[in-house]
């Protein structure tokens, strides 16, 4: 084909040759313009490709930064989980300790119940002793009046005032009789009660009562940590 064109161009002469040369020049000019446009377009594509590469690099750097932040957050979450586990263990230990203290308090309440019974027995024993002390005071008062009346009789002898001496002696005898009557009235009851209280207030009985109260209030095994 180029050979045919060269033959055609070589066969042209004069104005036809000039016209053909002008057409070829125009074509060459158009081709040069198209080549320039293509070069510019290629340059533009290269610039856009470079911009996209930069953008991709920036996105990669941002992704790397986000990955680092996610790693740091994961580390913090792990630390928080470990702290929460530690606090949970501490809370469990405190709960166990509180349960053990509650059990100790319950057992102490049982011991307190036993001691309250012992205190009640002691109060009864004190009541009996107070009654016996009252009887003894009656007896002592009666003996005092008799001694006083006898002293006055011996000191002043017989006379009108002997009535006062006799009255004092009678008051003493009445007081002694009152003490004897009270003693005889409640002696058997007090004797039985004293025996019972002495038995209940013995050290072995108190220990057994406290132990029974503790056993009755026990609700679970207790082991030292």
Image (spheres, rainbow, N blue to C red):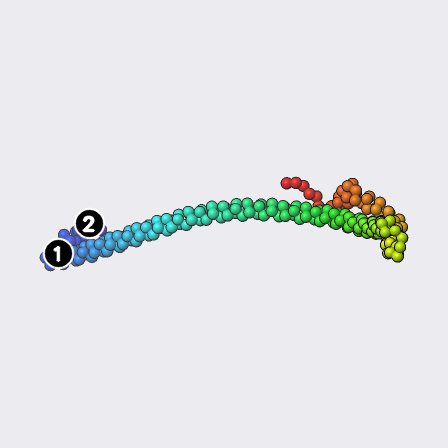
Name which quarter of the figure residue 27 lies in: bottom left
Inspect this view and state whether residue 12 appears. yes
Residue situated furthest left in the rendering:
14
Q: Are marks 2 and 1 in contact (CB under 8 Å)?
A: no
Can residue 31 be seen by looking at this rendering? no
Q: Which residue is mark 1?
A: 17
Closer to us: 157 or 202:
157
- Please state which of residues 60 and 75 is positioned toward the viewer in this rendering: 75
Where residue 28 sits in the image (x, y, percent)? 18, 55
Residue at the spot x=57%, y=47% of the render? 88
Residue drawn at the location 47% of the way across and 47% of the way down: 76
Q: Nearer the viewer, residue 121 or 222?
A: 121
109 left or right, relative to 14: right
Neighbours of disc 2 within 10 Å: few (<14), some (14-19), many (20+): few
Instruction: Check disc 1 and report its element: helix, strand or loop.
Output: helix
Q: Residue at coordinates 88% horizontally, 51% vertically from top-left? A: 157
As helix, strand or loop, the secondary structure at mark 2 comes to helix
Q: Would you name the residue on which mark 2 appears?
A: 3
- Name the N-terminal-most of marks 2 and 1: 2
Q: Where residue 195 sits in the image (x, y, percent)?
A: 84, 45
């Amino acid at each position: 084909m180029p050979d045919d064109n060269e033959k055609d161009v070589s066969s042209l002469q004069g104005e036809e040759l000039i016209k053909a040369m002008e057409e070829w020049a125009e074509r060459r000019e158009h081709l040069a313009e198209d080549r320039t446009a293509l070069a510019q377009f290629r340059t533009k594509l290269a610039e856009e490709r470079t911009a996209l590469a930069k953008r991709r690099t920036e996105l990669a750097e941002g992704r790397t930064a986000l990955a680092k932040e996610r790693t740091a957050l994961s580390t913090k979450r792990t630390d928080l989980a470990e702290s929460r586990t530690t606090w949970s263990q501490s809370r469990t230990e405190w709960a166990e300790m509180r349960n053990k203290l509650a059990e100790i308090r319950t057992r102490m309440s049982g011991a307190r119940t036993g001691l309250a019974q012992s205190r009640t027995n002691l109060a009864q024993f004190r009541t009996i002793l107070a009654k016996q002390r009252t009887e003894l005071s009656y007896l002592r008062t009666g003996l005092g009046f008799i001694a006083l009346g006898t002293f006055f009789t011996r000191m002043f002898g017989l006379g009108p005032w002997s009535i006062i001496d006799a009255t004092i002696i009678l008051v003493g005898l009445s007081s002694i009789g009152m003490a004897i009557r009270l003693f005889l009235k409640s002696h058997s009851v007090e004797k039985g009660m004293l025996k019972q209280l002495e038995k209940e207030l013995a050290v072995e009985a108190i220990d057994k009562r406290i132990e029974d109260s503790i056993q009755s209030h026990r609700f679970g095994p207790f082991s030292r940590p």
